[in-house]
Amino acid sequence: MANQNIPYKIYLSESELPRQWYNLRADMKNKPAPLLNPETLQPMTAADLAPVFCEELVAQELDDTTPFIDIPSKIRDYYKMYRPAPLMRAYRLEQALGTPAKIYYKFEGNNTSGSHKLNSAIAQAYYAKKQGLKGVTTETGAGQWGTALSMACAYFGLDCKVYMVKVSYEQKPFRREVMRTYGADVTPSPSDTTAVGRKILAEFPGTGGSLGCAISEAVEAATTREGYRYVLGSVLSQVMLHQSVIGLETKAALDKYDITPDIIIGCAGGGSNLGGLIAPFMGQKLRGEADYRFIAVEPASCPSLTRGKYAYDFCDTGMVCPLAKMYTLGSGFIPAPNHAGGLRYHGMSSVLSQLYDDGLMEARSVEQTAVFAAAEQFARIEGILPAPESSHAIKVAVDEALACKQSGEEKTIVFGLTGTGYFDMTAYERYNNGEMSDYIPTDEDLARGFAGLPQFPGSMN
């Protein structure tokens, strides 16, 4: 029986929408290593970053001391169109699993983009418009970020050029068409429209691409067009800052019913969703106010945290972006064309990489057939069709709930349901037809990626 004191959906009122983003870096004793200029190997300055990113986003990227940053009223007005997002109690899933665990999930799919990505897209488009720019360029993997950015650009009247990872471009034509409906120009990556794209195609003919490839093309497109800047949907600290609304709302909803989570789980590709979800809880842990288990879940086919190296690496395959210290498989690593497009990045957020290296969070990799099994189980029980990316978190949440069943412990589990899977039906079709397989890179595969890591004093642990 459901606890009548805790509803299936915990809603916050519009007045409870966060008015500030939380900058987790301000509470980190070990700050993330700075971005480095690839030519000088010196920390990137605002002047170095200004030709690529919007001015106020550069300031946010470099700020690791200010704990709270005001959310401009125009951004909050847009947030009100789909936020606050509900925190759901998975009573039916608990019953089906026969677990004493209590399971909650923060659902970020209540907007046309179908994901959490809009939280940062609207912020980045706002700052681009405020700066008087003509447009922005970006990359997208599964298409959620590109969709969100196209929506935000349409809202503010900005041009939007999207380089979409080729395998996702081909697997998800409807996601592509949503972007075009909102006015975006969408190009499969790698393409012959940029110098770096042509170089990658020459070296890897027939490749399905990667987020690293698409980033290189988008950066080149931005820096060669007057009045354009590049925006990124994950990895960077500024994006994690904007996504902190997820965690702030989650914590406020839990506090409303005096609920304290034991385990917080999120899927991890570049890290913005996981970082945003755990931010206020990790802040408490860093300040010694509370303790939680944090689990990052990544695909076994692209295991940056669980099998990567903690080193300075290029953020893109074309090696035109700054160097970031992160858990990485090497910027030249191109993962198998699995169906978790948004988790196919070779590295991990510098913030999350530092937290993981400090032992403050765990990481787990899972294979895609097990992920889709969990996705279908969840869809049939909870009634929401989850995105493949989100389903990585579902898989581990189920695993943890079953561990509670075995031990008899009544733990409280919270996970992030980052979006819906309605544009991912090709993947579901392959799973239902028994055509989906698991690919785990060999040590030799990873060694090829590691061989391209920059070598200089202090580049690795």
Image: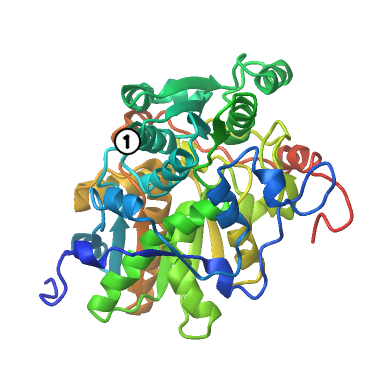
* Vertical side of 193 occupied by 405: above or below: below
User: In the figure, is residue 170 to the left or right of 307?
Assistant: left
Mark 1 residue type: Tyr
Which one is nearer the viewer's eye here, 424 or 143? 143
Q: Where residue 271 sits: x, y (%)? A: 52, 53
Q: Could you tell me which secondary element the residue under label 1 belongs to?
A: helix
Q: Which residue sits furthest right?
A: 457
Residue sitting at 51 percent across and 65 percent down?
23
Q: Nearer the viewer, residue 232 or 386?
A: 232
In depth, the one of 199 and 61 nearer the eye is: 61
* Residue 308 visible, this angle: no
Instruction: Assess disc 1: are there few (<14), some (14-19) or many (≥20) residues with their C-alpha within 10 Å of its C-alpha.
Output: some
- Vertical relation: 231 (above or below) 363: above
Q: Quick one: 81 or 404, which is closer to the camera?
A: 81
Image quarter hosting the N terminus: bottom left
Kindly indicate the quadrant of the structure image that contains residue 387.
top left
In the figure, is residue 146 to the left or right of 310?
A: left
Count of picture labels: 1
- Residue ID for mark 1: 155
Q: Position of residue 92 (x, y in %)?
A: 18, 60
The reply to whether residue 27 is visible in this rendering is: yes
Q: Residue at x 42, y 59 (%)?
A: 396
- At 85% from the left edge and 58% from the top edge, which residue is drawn? 458
**Image x and y of residue 259, in percent:** 29, 78
Q: At which x and y percent is residue 237?
A: 56, 55
Q: Where is the C terminus found, in terms of image quarters?
A: bottom right
